[in-house]
Image: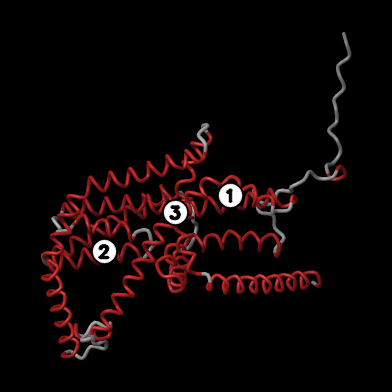
Amino acid sequence: MEERIRTVGRAAWWVIGIAGVLTLIGFLAYQLRVVFPPLVLAAIIVFLLNPIVTWLHGRGVPRVIGTALTYLAFFAIVVGLGLLLSPLVSQQFDELSERFPEVRADVEDTIDEYHDKSVENDWIVKVPTVKEIEDQAGGGDRKLSERVTTLRKLGARVFHVGLIFLLGPIVAFYLLIDLPSIRRSCEALVPEGSRSRVLLLAQRLNLVVGGFFRGQLAVALIVGVMVSIGLAVIGLPLWLIVGMIAGLFNIVPLIGPYIGAVPGIVIALTTKDLRAAVGVAVVMIVAQQIDNHFITPAVMRRAVQLHPAAVVMALLAFGTLGGFFGLLLAVPLTATFKVLGGHLWRRYVMGVSVPGLDEPDEEPPPEDRGPPPREEAAPAPA
């Protein structure tokens, strides 16, 4: 009993110490938060392209050349798809700009109608008018100086986002080139007695995080193609743009598909009728059911094993803290905490060995190996 109390006490102090270190790291990270978006984008690119670069390097191609070839192939694919789809996308964007005043007027009329109904029928939640929404959002009658300030802030944000997408691939390029030396430097910092255990744990984390990003992008591409085809079949205007939006938001687990369905339903209601909106909803639901039951299990291969409730809470927490990048990193970070926390809890609190992760790093001493095997006597010569 006393030994168990001491174990619990050591675990409690260990948790307090880790919490203090994490608090300090969080404070420093918040002060240096401007550098994280490019690093996050660079890490995603490294997780996506490193298997290809490593495969080329294993076949005798230097990492510098392999990284350059991988980048050229990636950008060639992106440019090729852009050239292939640009006429259709440009046509649909032109159609969207032509229809935007009509769509906006229909949406505003619908909102005002629901406002009148909410007032007449004494709804519990009153729907605001379009004018009230604009005033709350700061879009009402404003002075020229306020509009200039808003445009300046918007320009600064656009410049910041552009800088992120410029610096991220550059940082990723150098990381891909020097990844083996970085790995050797990190291994040298680990004590010899724990090196094999740490390497196995790092392999698990690499499988979780890399599998998530590669799988989510593959799933987003497949879902975007399925939704685009389905919307084209039912004759929805701007079907390719809506399908691209649905595929992009599918990167965010659970809530992304529902957000991606909103533009399609709004376009259907404003350009066609309720039947078209129902058709859009059916296409989205069918695509998500195919994704949830067939595509995601096959592509992700259960790389991230998290309960849906844990995913929702992680999205809420990280989305509040980090915005879009927080939503993007919520699941892999939570899975990382699960792997690390589960291992540390089993090993240092429960004292249980984790199969495949807690094998001894050194051979047992001679007294622990047991008696040597008995040698059978050789048969006597005839």
**CA separation in Å, label 3 and label 2:** 22 Å
Q: Is residue 210 left or right of residue 264?
A: right
Q: Which residue type carries mark 1?
A: Gln
Indicate the position of residue 365 as horizontal and vertical percent values: 84, 45
For the image, the number of numbered tags is 3
Residue identified by numbered label 3: 213
Q: Residues within 10 Å of mark 2 (few under 14, many from 20)?
A: many
The front one of 108 and 40 is 40
Q: Can residue 23 be spotted in the picture?
A: yes
Name the residue: 21% across, 54% down.
240
Give residue 312's position: percent from left, percent from top.
43, 68
| Mark 1, other Cα within 10 Å: few <14 / some 14–19 / many ≥20 | few
- Residue shown at the point (85%, 25%) measured from the top left: 376
Residue 150 position in % (x across, y down) = 30, 78
Q: Amino acid at mark 3?
A: Phe
User: Which element is circle 2 on?
Assistant: helix
The amino acid sitting under disc 2 is Ala
**Can residue 127 be seen by looking at this rendering?**
no
Q: Residue at x 28, y 83 (%)?
A: 146
Task: Give the position of the N terminus as an image quadrant.
Answer: bottom right
Query: Does 208 appear above or below 149?
Result: above
Residue positioned 24% across, 82% down in the render: 139
Of the 4 image quadrants, the one containing the C terminus is: top right
- Closest to the camera, between mark 3 and mark 2, is 3
In the rendering, which numbered label is found on residue 203? Answer: 1
Task: Find disc 2 in the rendering and name its residue.
Answer: 261
> Mark 1 or mark 2, which is nearer the start of the sequence?
1
SS at mark 3 in the image: helix
Marks 1/3: CA distance? 15 Å
The label nearer to you, 2 versus 1, is 1
